Amino acid sequence: MVTEQQVLDALRKVEDPEVHRSIVELDMVKRVDIQGSHVNVEILLTVAGCPLRNKIDQDVRAALAAVPGVESYDVVIGTMNEEERSRFAAKVRAGQADPLQIAGQPEIPALLREDAKTVFIAVASGKGGVGKSTTTANLAVALSRLGYRVGVIDADIYGFSLPNIFNLGDKRPTLVDKMIMPVQQDGIKIMSMGFFVHENNPVVWRGPMLGKMLRNFFTEAFWGDLDVMLLDLPPGTGDVALDVHSLLPKSKEIIVTTPQSNATEVAARAGTMAIRTNHEIIGVIENMSYFEVNGEKHYIFGQGGGEKLACELNTELLGQIPLTVATASGSGIFADGSEQARVFEKIAQNVAVKADIKMTATSGA
C-alpha cells in the first residue's frame, strides 16, 4: 500500500529550479490524495505564468513514477494565494539569512557577504560598439555549458542590451512578496534595467540613482547559490563602474576591445581604473578579430590590438573572437558547436581557472 510519507519523500527530491530547494520544504505541495495505487497531488506555483511550470511538472511526474506501488497519478498545478506566497518568501529568505547579522543593522545580501562563494567578474570596455555585451552574454553561456551556476547583471543602465542579446522577448522577473526572481534563460539568471523600462524609453537618471538601482539588483533579487556573477559594465569609467568597484571590492575584471588602436587606447583607461582600485584584471578578450573565408583569415580591423593591450595591462589575451554574419533569429548567442562558441568555451575554461571559480556540488544538475 502506497503511503503519503512515501510520496512526500519522493517529492522531497524535486527542487524549485529558481530557489534550488525542495518543493516539500517550500510548502509547494498542497495536497496528496492516495486511492490504492493511484496518487493525486496538487503543486502550488508562486504565480500563474511561472516560466518553469513545465520543468516542475515533469520532475514531479518523474518522482511519482519512481514510487514503488504507484501505477497511475494525476498532477494538478495551482497558484499560491498572497498568504502562501508570503510564507514561501519567508522560507526562501530564512535560507539565505546570515547567522552573523547584527540586530538593528541593514541585512547584507547573501551574495555580498564575506563568506559568499560567488566570484564576481566585471566585463568592461573603454568605448561602446566593441561587442562588450555580446561578449558578456556568450561568456555566461559558455560557463553555464561547463556546468557552473551563472548570474548576469546588465549594469549598463543607459545602454542595456542583454534582454535582446538573450532573445528574452516579453520575459520579465517574477515578483514574490516584494522579492524579485531574476529571469532565467538556459539556466542563467539575468537582471537588467531593460526589464523595467516601458517601450524602450530612455533612462534619464543622475549618478546616485544609478548606484541605487544597481544595489537593488543585489538586495531585492533572489539569486540563490551562484558560482559566478558577470556584470556587464557601461563603456568608460563613469559612475556605475565606480559603484561596482565600491560595492564589490573583490570583483575581478575582463577588458573587451577590438584590434583597432583607437579602441585599445580607450580600453586601457578602463583597465587602468581597475588597477587603481585594486581589482585584478583576469585578461583581455579581443572581439571582431578576423573574418574567415575558405580557411583564410582576413584581419579587416588590423592585428595585435588585444595582445598589445594585454601586455600594457600586465595580463594575458584570453581569446580572439572571429566576426560572423548576423542571423535573423534576434539572438546574439552563438550556436553550440560554432567556431565562436568553441572559442568562448576555451575562454571560459581559462577564466574559471584564473578566477578560481568553484563549482557547487549541485551545479549542472
Image (cartoon, rainbow, N blue to C red):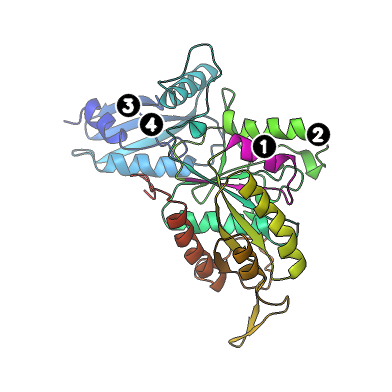
Circle 4 or circle 1, nearest the eye:
1
Q: Is residue 236 magenta?
A: yes
- Say left or right for 205 vs 56: right
Q: Are marks 4 and 2 in contact (CB under 8 Å)?
A: no
Q: Residue at x 45, y 61 (%)?
A: 349
Q: Residue at x 64, y 46 (%)?
A: 276
Looking at the image, which residue is at 53% across and 11% down? 104
Picture coordinates of residue 356, whole percent (x, y): 42, 51
Check disc 3 and give the amino acid type: Val
Is residue 353 something one can see in this rendering? Answer: yes
Quadrant where the N terminus sits is top left
Residue 306 is drawn in which quadrant? Answer: bottom right
Picture coordinates of residue 191 (x, y %)? Answer: 61, 41
Magenta-colored span: 228-248
Disc 4 to disc 3: CB gap under 8 Å: no
Q: Which residue is mark 1?
A: 243
